[in-house]
Image (cartoon, rainbow, N blue to C red):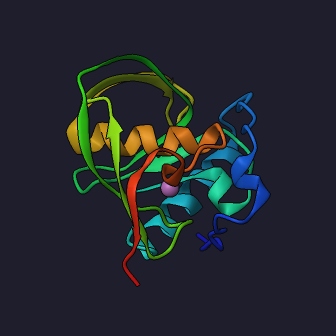
């Protein structure tokens, strides 16, 4: 396992549209494992590969119940609205209110390369939406109202 350096919002990699993963091979599995380790050490609830300088469509999310590591995640259904606070490991010290869908259905590929479908709501749905935005070059500060520095 290894800990990546997390890039911050000035880094252009965060503004790129990340490339789809062709196959979940050993390299992608290692990327997922190291991203999970990096997220845990940073006490984050989610991390997207561009945040560690790798422009690939891979995310990890853990809001406390279980670890999700997903390649090529895609939101295929969404409903409802939630407003709530967000921060980002790439925007240290910043927080803001972001409107998100309350419920989503996400499809993608797990660490074994198996196709998966996940129904999520509330905070977990928020975390997935935030991380998938990263794969499209979008940061929460683009969408947030009342952005504030807590430092
Ligand atoms: Co983020």
In this view, 142 is above or below 10: above
53 vs 150, left or right, is: right
In this view, 118 is above or below 127: above
The residue sitting at the top extreme is 77
The residue sitting at the bottom extreme is 151
At 22% from the left and 51% from the top, the residue drawn is 65
Q: Which sits in the foreground, 82 or 29?
A: 82
- The spot of residue 52 in percent (x, y) is 66, 62
113 vs 102, left or right, is: right
In this view, 60 is above or below 110: below
Q: Which sits in the foreground, 120 or 10?
A: 10
- The spot of residue 71 in percent (x, y) is 58, 35
Quadrant location, the C terminus: bottom left
Quarter occupied by residue 106: top left
In this view, 8 is above or below 132: below
Q: Which sits in the foreground, 113 or 103?
A: 103
Instruction: Let me know if residue 69 appears in the view.
Output: yes
At 27% from the left and 31% from the top, the residue drawn is 120
- The spot of residue 15 in percent (x, y) is 72, 48
Quarter occupied by residue 83: top left
- The spot of residue 27 in percent (x, y) is 72, 48
Quarter occupied by residue 117: top left
Quadrant location, the N terminus: bottom right
Instruction: Let me know if residue 111 appears in the view.
Output: no
How many numbered marks have been drawn onto this rendered protein structure?
0
């Amino acid at each position: 396992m290894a800990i990546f350096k997390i890039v911050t919002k000035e880094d252009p990699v965060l503004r790129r549209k990340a490339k789809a993963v062709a196959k979940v091979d050993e390299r992608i599995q290692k990327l997922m494992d190291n991203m999970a380790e990096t997220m845990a050490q940073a006490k984050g609830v989610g991390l997207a590969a561009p945040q560690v300088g790798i422009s690939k469509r891979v995310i990890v999310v853990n809001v406390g119940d279980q670890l999700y590591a997903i390649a090529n995640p895609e939101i295929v259904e969404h409903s409802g609205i939630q407003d709530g606070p967000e921060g980002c490991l790439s925007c240290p010290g910043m927080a803001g209110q972001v409107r998100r869908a309350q419920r989503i259905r996400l499809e993608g590929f797990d660490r074994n390369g198996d196709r998966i479908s996940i129904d999520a709501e509330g905070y977990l749905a928020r975390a997935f939406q935030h991380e998938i935005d990263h794969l499209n070059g979008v940061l929460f500060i683009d969408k947030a109202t009342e952005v504030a520095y807590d430092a």
